[in-house]
Image: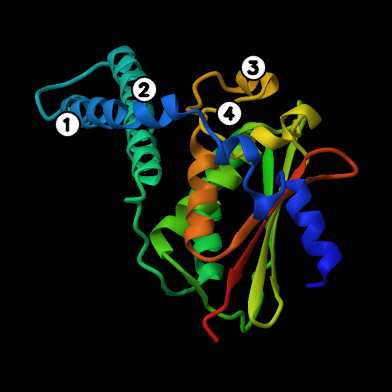
Amino acid sequence: MNEDNQKKQNNEAGGNGGQPEDQKNEPSLQNALSSPVSVAAHQMKNPLAIVRSYLDALISEDFGPVNLKQKEYLGDALENIDRMLKFVSDLLSMTSIDENKYKLKIKPTDIVSICSDVIRSLSFWAKASNSNIIFTTPENFPLVMADPVKMKEVIENLITNAIKYKSENSGRVEIILKDMGDEILFECRDNGLGIPDGDKDKVFSKFYRSEKSLEADPTGSGVGLYIVKAVVDLSGGKIWFEKNKKGGTTFFIILKTAR
């Protein structure tokens, strides 16, 4: 990769290898809040998990029959509990990152299988959302050095965002993998809402939500991309994004191969 392209990547993500200046120099107040947030998240996790198990038992009719209307309400409650559990998990990950306690288990990882598994798990929801995910499985693709569990979460986050913030009509998400020798390039290209020019330096910051994304999905936590960037950085990789000429955004990730 030549020097000009590397400069372009840094500029797209706010410089410094994709880390925005405001993220590097966040106010000390945010760091001071990390521990209380972590304590609160831990306190919420177990009660939410217990409530979820009760709801699951009720929906499964373990304690007796449930009519369709009751199942509908219980299903809505379960969906919201799952959303809260995801939010709590994100908060715990965020505070671990802030306290330099976020650990990865780096090993040779099959990123092709990860992409295929994520796309398969999201295919029903994508179809229901009038979105199409395109991925041509490359042959003889090298393994990458990454934590397979965390990298799956990274790819799932990017594809989920691409579907969630699609254009008003139909959504199109294209996943591309390129072998570049000692490194691989992952691309997640969409035709969605895009990122406002004024928000480019905030994308990987904690609790970032653009006005358009809030309108499309007011329930998001705003810490997903913060965690995504931390995982990529700790994997020895790079992440950045570019605006597509015909609308939407492409996120790029470079990872080292296991060759």
| Among numbered discs 3 and 2, the one appearing first in the sequence | 2
Whole-angstrom CA distance, mark 1 to mark 3, is: 31 Å
Q: Secondary structure at mark 4?
A: loop
| Among numbered discs 2 and 4, the one appearing first in the sequence | 2
Residue for badge 3? 215
Residue for badge 4? 208
Is label 4 or label 3 in front?
Answer: 4
Q: Quadrant of residue 32?
A: top left
User: How far from the left and from the top, in percent, is residue 111?
Assistant: 53, 68
Residue for badge 2? 80
x 21%, y 19%: residue = 66
Closer to the camera in the image, 173 or 209: 209
User: How far from the left and from the top, in percent, is residue 23?
Assistant: 57, 38
Q: Quadrant of the C terminus?
A: bottom right
Is label 3 or label 2 in front?
Answer: 3
192 on left or right of 101: right
User: How far from the left and from the top, in percent, is residue 142?
Assistant: 58, 81
Q: Is residue 56 above or below residue 162?
A: above
x 56%, y 41%: residue = 24
Q: Secondary structure at mark 2?
A: helix
Whole-angstrom CA distance, mark 3 to mark 2, is: 18 Å
Q: Quadrant of residue 17?
A: bottom right
Closer to the camera in the image, 18 or 74: 18
